[in-house]
Image (cartoon, helix red, strand yellow):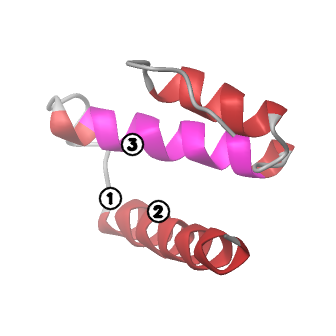
């Protein structure tokens, strides 16, 4: 599988979805995680970000990486 060159997360997510690497739910999770990451990285709505959200995201990302690392 070939991913698009210098593209953003949305393009990579779409490529992986088309290739069947990500299912619909995983694609939605990746989008949500990117949104949380971007809010934190750019200082947006910091008063609304919680430790609980960060833990849920970190656990989800770790599970996602473990699942897909074993599949490759």
The residue tagged with tag 3: helix, strand or loop? helix
User: What residue is shown at x 22% (from left), y 28% (from top)?
Assistant: 44
Residue 39 % position (x, y): 29, 34
Farthest residue, direction front: 1
Would you name the residue on which mark 3 appears?
36
Q: Are marks 3 and 2 in contact (CB under 8 Å)?
A: yes
Q: Quadrant of the N terminus?
A: top right
Would you name the residue on which mark 2 appears?
57
The residue tagged with tag 1: helix, strand or loop? loop
Residue 50 % position (x, y): 32, 58
Residue 41 % position (x, y): 18, 38
The one of 45 and 3 positioned closer to us in this rendering: 3
Per the rendering, the mark at residue 50 is 1
The one of 10 and 45 positioned closer to us in this rendering: 10
User: What residue is shown at x 66% (from left), y 81% (from top)?
Assistant: 70
The magenta stretch is: 26-39
Mark 1–mark 3 Cα distance, whole angstroms, equals 10 Å
User: What residue is shown at x 22% (from left), y 41% (from top)?
Assistant: 40
Residue 31 occupies quadrant: top right
Residue 51 % position (x, y): 30, 67
User: Dot 2: within a 10 Å radius of its alpha carbon, few (fewer than 14), some, or many (20 or more) residues?
Assistant: some
Q: Earlier in the sequence, mark 1 or mark 3?
A: 3
Q: Quadrant of the C terminus?
A: bottom right
């Amino acid at each position: 599988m070939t991913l698009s060159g210098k593209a953003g997360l949305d393009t990579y997510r779409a490529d992986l979805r088309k290739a069947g690497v990500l299912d619909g739910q995983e694609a939605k999770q990746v989008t949500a995680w990117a949104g949380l990451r971007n809010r934190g990285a750019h200082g947006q709505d910091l008063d609304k970000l919680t430790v609980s959200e960060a833990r849920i995201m970190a656990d989800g990302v770790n599970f996602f990486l473990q699942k897909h690392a074993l599949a490759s």
